Each structure stands twice: as C-alpha cells, then as structure tokens.
Image (tube, helix red, strand yellow):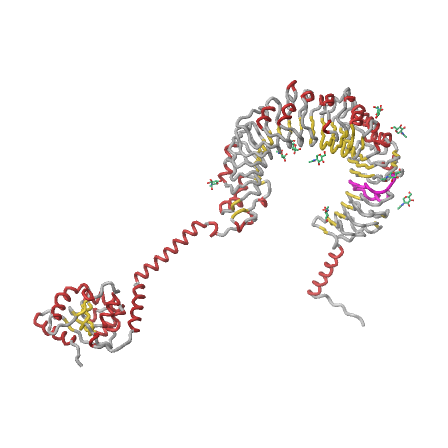
Amino acid sequence: MPVRMRPLNAKESVILFTLILAQGFDFCRSCNCDEQYFCNCSSNHLQHVPKVPANALGLDLSFNQIASIGMNDLTPYSELKTLNLHKNTLKFIHVEAFKSQHKLEVLDLSLNNLKNLSSSWFRELKSLQQLNLVENPYTTLGPAPIFQPLLNLRTLRFGSPSLREIYKNGLDSLAHLDEVTFIGSNLSLYENGSLKAARPIGLVSLSLQNLFQNDPELVSKVLQDVSHPETLLIIKDAQLRTNTSTEPFKATREGGTKSLTFQDSCTTDEALTSFLTVMDGSSLSYIGLEDIHLIGQGWWQKASYTHYENLHTAYIRNLDIQGFFEFSSMMQLGFLPVHLHRVSVINGTVFVIPPITTFLLKKLEYLDLSQNLLSDLTIEPTLSTSFGAYQNLITLNVSQNVLKSLGLMSRLITNLKSLIYLDVSHNSFVSMPEKCSWPATLKFLNLSSTKIRKLTPCLPSSLTVLDLSENDLTVFNQRFPQLTMLILTGNRLMTLPHGELFPRLQTLLIQRNALRMFNSSDLKRFRELQYLEAGYNNFVCSCEFVSFFRQDVDLFITLRDGRGNYVCDTPFTLRGDAIDSVRLSVFECYMIPAVSVLCSLIIIVLGLIVVTCHKLHVIWYLQMTKAWIQAKRKPAVGRLAEELRYDAFVSYSQHDAEWVEEILVPELESAHPPFALCLHKRDFQPGRWIVDNIIDSIEKSHRTLFVLSEHFVTSEWCRYELDFSHFRIVDEHNDSAVLVLLEPIKKETIPKRFCKLRKIMNSRTYLEWPEEEEKRNEFWSNLRAVLQRDEC
Ligand SMILES: *[C@@H]1O[C@H](CO)[C@@H](O)[C@H](O)[C@H]1NC(C)=O
Ligand SMILES: *[C@@H]1O[C@H](CO)[C@@H](O)[C@H](O)[C@H]1NC(C)=O
Ligand SMILES: *[C@@H]1O[C@H](CO)[C@@H](O)[C@H](O)[C@H]1NC(C)=O
Ligand SMILES: *[C@@H]1O[C@H](CO)[C@@H](O)[C@H](O)[C@H]1NC(C)=O
Ligand SMILES: *[C@@H]1O[C@H](CO)[C@@H](O)[C@H](O)[C@H]1NC(C)=O
Ligand SMILES: *[C@@H]1O[C@H](CO)[C@@H](O)[C@H](O)[C@H]1NC(C)=O
Ligand SMILES: *[C@@H]1O[C@H](CO)[C@@H](O)[C@H](O)[C@H]1NC(C)=O
Ligand SMILES: *[C@@H]1O[C@H](CO)[C@@H](O)[C@H](O)[C@H]1NC(C)=O
Ligand SMILES: *[C@@H]1O[C@H](CO)[C@@H](O)[C@H](O)[C@H]1NC(C)=O
C-alpha cells in the first residue's frame, strides 16, 4: 500500500529536530567541544577517532587507546589546526590519513607505538608548524627524506631511546626550523650533517644521556652539526662523569656556541675540569646549569689557566652538591669570575663567598644568590667591598636566605656605588632600625615576606619601587617622594595610606589587607595614581561605598585586578557577594534618616491620637461608659425612701454658684422641714471619681435640680448631654428632673443640637426665677412642692 507523505506539523518538527540534536550530541558524547570549536576528547578510553563537528578547529585525543588511523577517519575535519594524539597506542597511520588537513599547524604523535615513519603522511601538511614525534619505537630516520613536504615546520621534536640510526637525508630540507628537540640516548649511527640545517636553528635541545660516556665520537658529530653562534644549545639528561665524556664539546667550541645550558644532568669534578679545559678560549658567553647533581668537592684547579673572556653570564639553579660539606667553597673558581657580568646561583646551598673570590667580581653587574644559606654572619664577608669588588653591581638578589638584620644589610651595601635593585625578600627581619644608610642610587627595594611589623624612617626616600607585600604592617606613614610603585599586598592595613605621602605614585597594589572602604577623597589625595589593585579586602558594603565603587571609582583610577575580586565582607547578609552585584534598598541606604523619619511619624501619630483623645474626651468617655455600665448593672430596685438621703441633687454651673449657694441653699435648707440638698462642692466624697460621685448622688436623691441660665445652656449643657451620669435624668420619661431657669431662655436660642433639653423643656414645666421680689415667694413654694417627697 503506498504511503502518502504529508508535511510535518510544528510539533513533529520539534521532535524530529530534538532527535537529530540528540544524535548529534550522542556522537560527540565523549568529547567536549567549546565555542572556539576546540574538541577535547582527552582521557576517554577511545579506540577510534571519534566523530566531532566537521568544523572543529582543534581536536585533543590524548590519553586514549587509539591504535590506528584509517584513510577516512580524519577526512571530514579539513579545518583542523591542532591535532593531539599524545599517549595513545598508535601503530598504524594510513598514508593518506592526513590528506585533508591542509590547515593543520600542530600535530602531536608523541608517546605512541609507531615503528616506521612515513613521509607520505606529511604530504599535504603544508601549514604544519609544530610536529612532535618523540617516544615512538621507530629505530631509524632516513635514509629517505621524511619531512620534505613540511615547508613551514618551525618546531620538531623527535627521537627516543629506540632510535638507533639517523641518516643525513632523513632531516633534509628543514629550512625554517626554530626549535629542535632530539632524544637519541641509544643512537649508534649518525650521519654527518643530519641535524645541520640550512639556516642555524634558534634552539636545540639534546637528550643523549649515557651517550656522552658510551660514544663520545658520535656525540661529537651531533654537536658539530648543532653548534653555531646563533644557536642556543641545551644538553639534557647528560651523564658527564669522566674526562672523555666531555671531549665532544670541542665541537661546540669550534662551532662558536655562545649559549650552553645543562639541565637535569649529573657531573663530577673530573668531568667539569675537563669540560673547562676543553672549552678553554671559547666564545661562550652564557653558561647555564639547571638541576645539576655534582659529585665532587670543587677541586677544579686543573682548569685554572683557562680563558673565558667572553663568559658574561653564569646561571646556576638547583645545584645539588653531593660532597657539599667538603666542598672547597669555589676557591678554585677564581679564574672564572673575572669576566662575569651576571651571576645567579639560585638554590645552590651557598652560604658564603670568600673575599678572595669577591675581589675578582669587579665587573659584576648582577648577582642573584636567592634561595641559599646566607646568614648575618656570612653575608658580611660575602658582600665585602675590599679591593673594589662590586663597584659595578646594579642588581643584588639575596631573597630567600636566612638574614635577620636589615640594619646590617643596609650598612653592607652602602658602599655599592651603582646598586639600583635590591631584593631581600623572604628573610626574617621582623623589625627595622630607626636609621639606616643606603647607596644613593637605590631605586628598587623588595622587602616582601620579611615579617616586618612597623615602618621606620630607615627606608631610603630615593626609592621608585617598593615591595612590602606579605608583611604584618598595620600602618603606613612614611613619605616617599620618588615612589611610582608601591606593593602592600598581604598586610593588615585597614585604610589606604595617605596619598600626600606619594606625590609620584602611579601603581598601588594593596590586595588581601583589611581595607574596609575607600572613597573619592582618599583617591584624590594621590596626585598621579593610575592603577589600583585592592581586591580581596574586608569591604564594608555601605551605601556610600557601594555607590562610589559602582559609579565613580573608574573616574579616578583603573582597577587592574578585575572588579570581580572586590567582594563584601560585611554586612553578614552580603558576605562573599561581588560589590558590583550588590543591590541595596533605599531603607538600607538611608537607615538613619529612615529611622528618624519613622520615629518622628510614630511620635506625630501618637501625639495626634493623644490630642484627639484629649479633644474628644475619649478617655473620659471610656471611663464614663464603664461607670455607666456599672450603674446600669446595679439591681434596679425601687428607690426606697430610706435610701434617699437627699431630697435633691443640685446640678449647676460654676457661673451660677453664687445664686445657688447664697440664695437657693439657705432658703431650702432653712425651710420647715428642711430639705436635704446635695451639692457637689460640699457633699461629694473627696478622693472619689467625680462621675461615681454624681451617679451616687443622683441615686441617693429624690430629685435632680438643674439650675439653668443662658450661659449654662449655651456653654455647658453640652457637657450634660454628653454626661452619661445625667443620662437617666435627662431621659424625657423620667420625672425626677426639675428645671429652674435663672433667667428667661427663649427656646429658639437653645442650639438645635441640644434636642434633649428642648424636649424636656417642651414636655415639662419649669420654674422661672422671677426678677420681681414679690413673685419670689410663689417661686419658693412651687419649688418646695416639687421637691416634696410623696408620702405614700
Ligand atoms: C582536555 O581535558 C583534559 C582533562 O580531561 C585536560 O587535562 C586538558 O588540559 C584539556 N586539553 C585542552 C587543550 O584544554
Ligand atoms: C616498517 O618498515 C620495514 C622495512 O622498511 C617493513 O619491513 C615493515 O613492515 C614496516 N612496518 C610497518 C608497520 O609499516
Ligand atoms: C639500546 O640499544 C640496544 C642495542 O644496541 C638495545 O638492546 C636496547 O634495548 C636499546 N635500549 C632502548 C631503551 O631501546
Ligand atoms: C664525519 O665527521 C667526522 C668527524 O666529525 C669525520 O671524521 C668524518 O670523516 C666525517 N664523515 C663524513 C662522511 O663526512
Ligand atoms: C682522564 O682521567 C684519567 C683518569 O681518570 C687520567 O688517567 C687521564 O690522564 C685523564 N685525561 C686527561 C686528558 O685529563
Ligand atoms: C632546590 O634544589 C634541590 C636539589 O638540589 C631540589 O630538590 C629542590 O626541589 C629545589 N628547590 C626548589 C624550590 O626549586
Ligand atoms: C630574586 O630572586 C627571587 C627568587 O629566585 C625572584 O623571585 C625575584 O624575581 C628575584 N628578584 C629580582 C629583582 O630579580
Ligand atoms: C619581590 O619578591 C617577591 C618574592 O621573591 C616576588 O614574588 C615579587 O615579584 C618581587 N617584587 C617585585 C616588584 O619584583
Ligand atoms: C572618606 O573616607 C575616610 C576614611 O577612609 C573618611 O575619614 C572621610 O570622611 C571619607 N570622606 C568622604 C567624603 O566620605
């Protein structure tokens, strides 16, 4: 049945695309390809060249188990510039394996199992610049030319202990070589001229091991080819024990080699003496001895009459002297140093240079004795300037020794008239004297890691570079008018030093201190500062600092150590955050103003509440409500006659007190029978709350007499209407209220809001205090009648 194809819908397309992608990732699962199209498939137990994107520029297949490269394994990768097959098990490479790698620049086939080299491999590698073939078991190079197609090769590494034969044509036509590394420790045949390039090679490194012992003649042929004034020669892994093993260096002398370095080698007094004799009168200007094991005691006097006028530099590093304790302290070396300009003896267990030697160091400009055993005791003879030694010394490095006195050090070098650079780092000075003397020429002083706690005026003001890193300084207060670079990394300073002290300072390094912040005024004090490195400090991420750092710091200086290293220490919530990423809220930033504003607001609101309460008598209301509720709760028993102590409770305003006290009270209380009146002034229980008193009095009174006047009504009735204690009486259905009008009050003048009073006045008759004397008797009798208790 034919299947009709329809176009994929969107969902299906996505699924399909995902599948394709998954497949894609699957085939380079073992590789890690980055944005630069470099695929790292190192250490993946691969047995074949894996599939990677065809546009890969680099492919690292090192540390796998690839045994062969077939004709088409690499065909898709025509863009490759780097191919690394170091440490596989490669036995076979197809002659056309690299046919599409026109662009390959670096090819590493080292540490494999290639028994034969084929020139066909390289036929298309026109761009190849670096080729590494070392440590493969091929035994011969040539006679057929192998590297002929590699017209651009600059660096070639080849050979292994298996290599036995080298034929001249094997290395033919390598016109552009800059660097050759050759391992040939088991060589038995070397055709003259094999390593002789058309143009002198810049650097040749030879690892011939025992061959110096076993076949000096063959070595001689090799050296002959690589010795040239323009070629730096490195002899690695050499065993130079007997006087014959150094014979081949005749070729070096004849070739005019100027720079010769021994690395990882072993030698003896005998071989050394012989070497010096062989090289007598050579044009050697640089000799390097790195990681040398010397079996001997320094008896080199046989070489005393040799000439090394051209030898300017001796670089000795990691010298291990087996007979160290019997070593004759280089005394025999006198013939050598006379012409030396630069001497480095680094990590060589040197503890003294006797004056008999120093007196020969007249031409010395550079002396590096770092990582040795110089102490306060031995530094004195070592730096002795008697007989005019060291008068040309510009640089002195005694870093990493066991010196303890900076004062002594400064005294010893005072007479070094040319000294500019002094490195005394990694000694244990701990303190410095108040006064020191220094050569006037001194510009550079390295006091790093010397455990110094406090600065004194000891340090010379002529300095342009001062390194005080990794000490225990807490304060920096010395002035250095010439200083352009100051290194204070790794101390305990809490603030930047004052910029006024360094008018010329351009670079300040102050990482890993205890700086809490710095601001524009701190930086403005440095007149010439351009670069600052101040990361890894204990920054307090206050708002001022964060905003200054984020916005303005670049206006003053360049932070050369990268802004990401500037990290908050406090507040705790921000610890470890890069200052650039910190976001502080307005509240955090304006804490003090915010808190003050908040407090003022609270105070204002409280004030308002208090004022409002006061105005609206809220407290009074509350108390009133409480009292009223209590009054209401009292059992509403009928008011028994015996409970009624008073006939009337008189409610009046202070305004009308005179009338009440001088007219009303005498009249009623002297009547027959007398009326018992309750006046708040007189009868209230002192100390009791007024409201309770009022309620109590009203309850104990038969009637309540309101003395009303115009003033009372307009200004004080208000209170009465509000007054719950009068509530019952003011209630219109209660007839216990008696109104006495002291003066005529027109109902219309009563403010409308006093509806209760209006109602009472409407519903009830009231007694008016007459103006005329003759009507007053009638008034009193009416009043008496009203107040009279009903005897029932
Ligand atoms: C490839 O990865 C390995 C670790 O798997 C690493 O050691 C190696 O340096 C990487 N190679 C390159 C060129 O980055
Ligand atoms: C290497 O070359 C030799 C002779 O030149 C030959 O006999 C041998 O088969 C070759 N081996 C390989 C693996 O090509
Ligand atoms: C050096 O050559 C000898 C033969 O001359 C051989 O027996 C020996 O295995 C070789 N050494 C190495 C490390 O290949
Ligand atoms: C190779 O050089 C040696 C000495 O370096 C010499 O004795 C010999 O004749 C030379 N051989 C050839 C073929 O040039
Ligand atoms: C080399 O050393 C041996 C003894 O080790 C000695 O007999 C011989 O004379 C020395 N040869 C030279 C040239 O110094
Ligand atoms: C100093 O030299 C010794 C050998 O003499 C070596 O073992 C040691 O690693 C060297 N130290 C340094 C720091 O290079
Ligand atoms: C002095 O020696 C130390 C250690 O070898 C080195 O780090 C430093 O750079 C040297 N100082 C100078 C000024 O060369
Ligand atoms: C000072 O000495 C230390 C330790 O030897 C070194 O790391 C540093 O680079 C030196 N300082 C300068 C400015 O060379
Ligand atoms: C800058 O910081 C210093 C302390 O480092 C302080 O004394 C000074 O008042 C600050 N100046 C400004 C403008 O904040």
Against 96, residue 420 (above or below) is: above
Instruction: Give the side of residue 693 with respect to residue 498, left or right.
Output: left
Q: Which quadrant would residue 155 be assigned to in this image?
A: top right
Figure quadrant, ligand 3: top right
Residue pictured at 13% horizontal, 70% vertical? 669
Which residue appears farthest toward the top when viewing the image?
387
Against 6, residue 23 (above or below) is: above
Which residue appears farthest toward the bottom when viewing the image?
792
Q: Is residue 287 magenta?
A: no
Nearest the viewer among 786 and 398 is 398
Instruction: Give the side of residue 224 with respect to residue 631, left or right.
Output: right
Per the rendered image, the range of residues in magenta is 118-141
Instruction: Give the side of residue 455 with respect to residue 788, left or right.
Output: right
* SS majority, magenta: loop
In the rendering, at what x and y percent does residue 257 appear? Answer: 78, 27
Residue pictured at 47% horizontal, 49% vertical? 589
In the rendering, at what x and y percent does residue 666 appear? Answer: 12, 68
Against 34, residue 214 (above or below) is: above
Q: Is residue 138 magenta?
A: yes
Q: Quadrant of the C terminus?
A: bottom left
Instruction: Give the side of residue 495 with respect to residue 622, left or right.
Output: right
